[in-house]
Amino acid sequence: MKKKALIVVFDMLAGHWDKSIVVPSTGLQPPNVMGYVKAGKLPAFRECIEQGVFVYSWNNGNCNTPYGQKYLASGTYKVKAEAMNGSFCQLTEGMDRKTILNACKEQYPAGKVASFGSDAWMQSGWWKAPDATYGFGGYFSDFLTTQYCFKWMTENPDWKMTLLYLAQYDLTGNCPVYKKDVFYTEDKHHSLLYLDKILWMIIELLKESGWWNETLLFIASDHGCHYGCETAVEEGRSRGIPEKSLSNYCSNHQPPYDCRQWDFKNNTVTNKKSNCCRRTTFMINGGALPQDLRKKSISYGEIIDFSPTIAKLMGINFSSDGTSLV
Ligand SMILES: [Zn+2]
Ligand SMILES: [Zn+2]
C-alpha cells in the first residue's frame, strides 16, 4: 500500500461544544473546532471538515495529558500513566500496549516512522517512534517543532507515518477566553486562530511536496478544558478572578471532568451536563481519503477509536479496545 499517514495532535483542543453556550466577550461558542468553523473563523479546519471526516469525539477516561496521549497512541483506556512533578511521566513496566507507530513499522518495515513533540510523551508507551524521535522541552515552540518535522519529512521522503504533537495550546489553561490584541497563548481565542495557521502550513507542506494525494491526515486532541461550568467558576474564584469576569475565564482540565453548565445570569449551577474536558478533536482528511468517506460527520466516537481508525485506513494489523469509525 502506497499510503502515508501524518498524525497531528493538538494538546487541549476541544473539538466541539454544547451549541447553546455563547461567550459574552466574543459572541461565539467557547473556543472549539466545530463552533469556530461554523462561525467562519478557521479556514484550514473548515477545509478538513468539508472535505473529510469529523467525529464528535469524547475522552471517557482520565482527561489529563499523560493518559490522553496513551489512549490516542494505543487505543485502550487500560494504561498506566503517572505525572511526575506535574509534567514528566514514568513508564510503568508491563502496562503498555503496542502503539499505532510501532504497529505501522511492523506492517511496513520499509517505510520510516518518526515523531516530533514534547519529550515527556516521546517515550515508549506514548509516541516514541521506531526510526526517529525528536523530543523537545515542555511547551517548546509549535512553530519550531513543526519546522523540524517538515525538515525531516523532506529529507526522508520514504516516511510512512509521522506524528507531530503540538503542546502550546495547553498553555492556555487558567486564562481569559478573549483579550483584545494579544499574542498566541495569552488567551484562548487567539491561540485557536493560531492553530488554524499551523494546520494550514501542514496542509501546504503536504501539497507543495507532492505528498497530498497519497497521504491521510489524522488530527486529534487528548482533552478539552473547562469553561462556563461549575469547575471553571470554582477555579476562577479560587484564583481571585472578579465575579464579572468569570464568564470570560477559561479554566484548565482538572477533575471533575463530568461538570455541569453554569448560569451566569443567575450566578448558579444548572442541571445541564457540560463535560467540557471530555470534548476531544478527531478529524481525518488528506488526498488519500477514499471519496465515499468524504464530507462525513460521525455523531459519536471515543479517543480510543483514533488509533484503530488509522489502522483500518492504513491497512495495519492492530488490536485495541476501540473500534474503527470507518
Ligand atoms: Zn493535554
Ligand atoms: Zn467543565
Image (tube, helix red, strand yellow):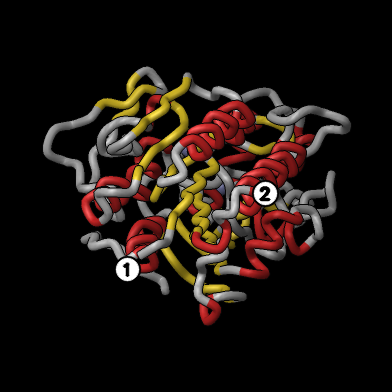
**Percent x, y for residue 263?**
70, 53
At 37% across and 45% down in the image, what residue appears?
62
Instruction: Examine the image and state in which quarter residue 156 appears.
Output: top left
What is the crowding at mark 1: few (fewer than 14 residues within 10 Å), some, or many (at least 20)?
some
Q: Would you place residue 319 above or below residue 247 in this image?
A: below
Q: Is label 1 within 8 A of ligand 1 (CB to nearest ligand atom)?
A: no
The type of residue carrying mark 2 is Glu
Q: Secondary structure at mark 1?
A: loop
**Percent x, y for residue 140?**
55, 23
For the residues labelled 1 and 2, say whether their Cβ atoms are less than 8 Å apart. Answer: no
**Percent x, y for residue 41?**
79, 53
Q: Secondary structure at mark 2?
A: helix
**Percent x, y for residue 82?**
29, 30
**In this picture, residue 284 sits left or right of residue 308:** right
At 69% across and 65% down in the image, what residue appears?
19
Q: Would you place residue 25 above or below residue 207 in this image?
A: above
Q: Which residue position is annotated with label 2? A: 204
What is the crowding at mark 2: few (fewer than 14 residues within 10 Å), some, or many (at least 20)?
few
Residue 19 appears in view? yes
The type of residue carrying mark 1 is Thr
Mark drawn on residue 323: 1
Q: Earlier in the sequence, mark 1 or mark 2?
A: 2
